[in-house]
Amino acid sequence: MVHGDHGAALPEAFPDKLSTSALAQCAATGRALTTLRREVLAIFAGAPRPLKAYEIVERLSTPSRRVSPISVYRSLDFLIEIGIVHRLATQNAFVARDRDRAQDETLVFMICQCCGDVDEAVLPGMTRSLAATADAHGFRSRGHSIELQGECEDCRSALANPNRRG
Amino acid sequence: MVHGDHGAALPEAFPDKLSTSALAQCAATGRALTTLRREVLAIFAGAPRPLKAYEIVERLSTPSRRVSPISVYRSLDFLIEIGIVHRLATQNAFVARDRDRAQDETLVFMICQCCGDVDEAVLPGMTRSLAATADAHGFRSRGHSIELQGECEDCRSALANPNRRG
DNA sequence: TTCAATTGTGTTACAGTATAACATTACAAC
DNA sequence: GTTGTAATGTTATACTGTAACACAATTGAA
């Protein structure tokens, strides 16, 4: 089962928003959402936090099926290309988001150093601002990575009120 | 050049702007700009591009002196702490810059995928914009990483006019 | 002086991240 | 059926970063 079996059934609750977006992207670009790519996506769909590549390797591997790191990396590269998955460069980790992939949207990731959770935002003026800066330097931008490190609201509350933590 | 000349041929005399900034930061924080840290800084001063940690290891090592990766990483951590060196998360590489380290300045790095050169800029409104976004999400930001990937002016010219390249 | 605390480096070993190179499988188009 | 392309399998390895503990130098104080 390499590619072409776009209708393969998956153990998890499919289709979700992620795979719907992925399928739309594949249809638009003439590429295939293969079994392996679906499986990786399914793992993201069930994960509340960013995933490490080798976590995905572990979760896909069973005693009878050894998924190699490079296969996972290749699937990740694909999902990144179609805009479903984002690499958190500062964390060596990956997240899946189903936002509209309008090319002029600038995603900002806020990464909690305490609990590892990631939130994301779109800065309306950011795209223009970055483009203007790049222009001023003669730089043609083709991609970006914007990540904030800090503490999320929950962790700040917990730190401020250690007695109340659950 | 086993010892005494810092292990690197410098194009400019010491002290340069980088080490001047570093010394000022050390004086302000009561920490030491040791020989190893100076050597790492000197390598940055002579490098036109971002450096990989293991490139620094190689340049510091000689047949009679084996500098270990962890020593280099420790020096890099120190130089990052005092704001002289920045880590390019998307490249697993490091650059030294001698900008004023005003805490409200938001550095943006523009990384040429073609030649590897890095330019940086300060976006005036960015700090406020990011802070407002973080606030809106209850996120307390303590650090950030903003990197653009693309092509620098020189490489764009070269690509547009392949005959003229030199 | 001697002790303890602090800072920084040396040394060894290893953990974690990512890719190269080549073989194989599946499908589509001719 | 042959060829071209896309995707994965397989093996091995390169690259990036850290843990753990020992050693050395400095400082401040009993």
Image (cartoon, coloured by chain):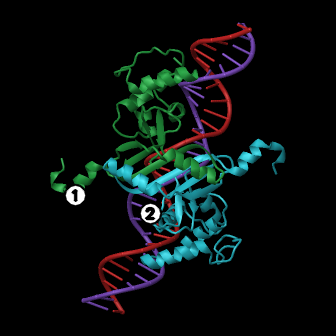
Chain colours: A green, B cyan, C red, D purple
Amino acid at the residue labelled 2: Asp
Q: Position of residue A54 (x, y in %)?
A: 45, 38
Q: CA distance from mark 1 to mark 2?
A: 25 Å
Q: From the viewer's perspective, is residue B2 above or below residue B94?
A: below
Numbered badge on residue B104: 2
Q: From the viewer's perspective, is residue B149 above or below residue A28?
A: below
Residue B113 can be seen in this image: yes
Numbered badge on residue A160: 1
Residue A64 can be seen in this image: no
Query: Is residue A8 toward the left or the right of residue B67 in the image?
Result: left
Q: Position of residue A30 (x, y in %)?
A: 58, 20
Q: Residue furthest right?
A: B163
Q: From the viewer's perspective, is residue A140 above or below residue A44?
A: below
Amino acid at the residue labelled 1: Ala
Query: Is residue A66 toward the left or the right of residue C30 in the image?
Result: left
Q: Chain of mark 1?
A: A
Q: Residue furthest left?
A: A163
Q: Which residue lies at the image location 54% right of the left edge and 49% below the top edge?
A: A130
Task: Report crowding for label 1: few under 14, some 14 to 19, many 20 or more residues within 10 A (C-alpha).
Answer: few
